[in-house]
Image (tube, rainbow, N blue to C red):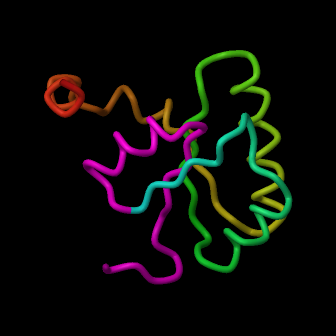
Amino acid sequence: YGFSFGVPIIFSEGLFDSEMISLVYRFSFAYMTSGISDVLAQFISTITDKAILIPDNDKAGMFGFEKSVKLLNRYNIKTKNFFLFLKKLDFNVLQLIAF
């Protein structure tokens, strides 16, 4: 499937988010809570060193995002916040995908 160590994986809070992302990017994973656990961070470190996080845009999601970034950095996983890329996205394309 073209996956090898170091390929970025996109992590989101929920299954629906992950399913929608998988329409345009194959390596999507839902962590099913507001933040990544230590056990999950250890596992992630065995398959990649790059993670893009898509938290829910609420208080719990933002808190979980900050916690997850610190945890992933502890395992030498580079992280990006998806919201920082929103300015670069073509929303017309996103609307076609979503609807």
| Residue pictured at 19% horizontal, 34% vertical | 97
Looking at the rendering, the stretch of residues picked out in magenta corresponds to 1-26
Q: Is residue 22 magenta?
A: yes
Residue 86, image quadrant: top left
Residue 44, image quadrant: bottom right
Q: Is residue 80 left or right of residue 91?
A: right
Q: In the rendered image of this protein, does residue 76 appear above or below residue 37?
A: below
Closest to the observer, 15 or 48: 15
| Residue pictured at 82% horizontal, 49% vertical | 70
Residue 14, image quadrant: top right
| Residue pictured at 38% horizontal, 44% vertical | 19
Q: Considering the image in quadrants, where does the C terminus appear?
A: top left
Q: In the rendered image of this protein, does residue 42 appear above or below residue 35?
A: below
What is the x, y in percent for residue 3?
40, 79
| Residue pictured at 77% horizontal, 59% vertical | 73
Q: Is residue 4 left or right of residue 30?
A: left
Residue farthest along the top direction in this orientation? 58
What is the x, y in percent for residue 75?
79, 68
Q: Is residue 70 left or right of residue 43?
A: right
What is the x, y in percent for residue 38?
85, 59
Q: Is residue 75 magenta?
A: no
Q: In the rendered image of this protein, does residue 21 appear above or below residue 64?
A: below
